[in-house]
Image (cartoon, rainbow, N blue to C red):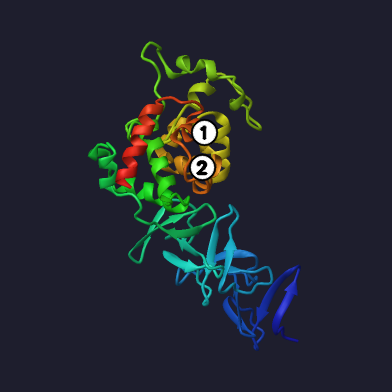
Amino acid sequence: MAKKGWVKDKGKWYYYDTNGSMKKGWVKDKEKWYYLLDNGEMAANRWLQDPKSFKWYFFRSNGEMLVSDWAKDSVGKWYYLRSNGEMAVSQMRNGGDGNNYYLGSDGAMATKGEIKWDGNWYYVKRSGVCGIIKNIVTKRNLLDLGWREKLLTDNMLLKLNAVLSEYGIANKNSLRHFLAQCCVESGCGEILLEKHSSKFPSPQEYFRNRDFKEYNNVPGSPAMEGDGAKYRGAGYIQITWKDAYYKFAKYIGDDEILNRGCEYVAANYAWESAGWFWSVFKKLNSLIENEPDITVDRVTKIVNGGYTALEKRIEVYNRSCDVI
């Protein structure tokens, strides 16, 4: 008797037409789509690229083509399969939870960076959630605070406003304090790596006294020689110590932050590290919103650990009150 329909053989499923011929390629059964490989085996729990259309599809463990749903690959990247089963690419989609997510040209959901879509710029969180970047601080604002024009590139301003938007640093007083601290910590953007004295031949020599301090001990990575220089101040607010780098790396989901240290942060997360430090690590955003009369002295103590250049910080804060 000729085989018909679905037949299981040695744990694998095959499909035979009414003539008893084993099918290959696409098969529709009871309004569900399936794909039979060249040997007739049903594709299951796997990704597959159609050899004709070159579109990607995902098939559940029962062989059904996934539609209108999300799927994760073996390295943890998320993809969206449209109502026709095709993997969505280069588009913003509403996730059904009220949030927007961006799918890149390879279909993978973006988890960091900035995306331009339909005329708007979006920041991207680690979770994939995209939010509109508001134009909170302008080039003119920073020029009035003493920044040199050559540093104020479109990309730099985009990343600044992305961080302000993502980390909610929009309250005027919090923003003024934030900008004042960043201005002094980074020398108005001139210094993204903590400097060492010219009297010492290298940062390792200059920061040697920090190497084995308590804040350079983190889970799985005890303090060691060279940590003082490796985890010296970086970014617009100069995050310092391995402890801060470790927590920032966990929050962002980038192990290279801890592996490579200050130079990597300065090059890749100069504004992001400042926003995280301000709103997440030190919770200054919430503190300032709840205590609008907070002094520059107190904010400086939280940021700097002391009162270095306090007069300058007060001066820039007062100027920021006129600018912002």
Residue 68 against residue 231 in the figure, above or below: below
Q: Nearer the viewer, residue 247 or 280?
A: 280
Q: Are marks 1 and 2 in contact (CB under 8 Å)?
A: yes
Q: CA distance from mark 1 to mark 2?
A: 8 Å
Q: Residue tagged by mark 2?
A: 284
Please tell me which residue lies in front, 85 or 24. 85
Q: Badge 1: how crowded within 10 Å, few (<14), some, or many (20+)?
A: some
Check the picture and name the quadrant holding the N terminus. bottom right
Residue 88 lies, in percent from the top left, at: 47, 68
Q: Is disc 2 surrounded by few (<14), some (14 to 19) or many (20+) residues within 10 Å?
A: many
* 32 with respect to 322 (left or right): right
Would residue 263 appear left or right of 35 to someone viewing this image?
left
**Label 2 is placed on what type of residue?**
Leu
Residue 253 seen: no
Q: Is residue 309 left or right of residue 31?
A: left
User: Residue at (23%, 39%) from the top-left corner?
Assistant: 150
Q: Is residue 170 above or below residue 240?
A: below
Image coordinates of residue 75 in percent, x first then y, are 58, 52
183 above or below 14? Answer: above
Element under disc 2? helix
In the picture of the structure, the residue carrying the numbered disc 1 is 302
* Mark with earlier residue (1, 2): 2
The residue furthest front is: 293
Q: Residue furthest left?
A: 149
Can see residue 242? Answer: yes
Tell me residue 72's x, y (percent).
Answer: 59, 60
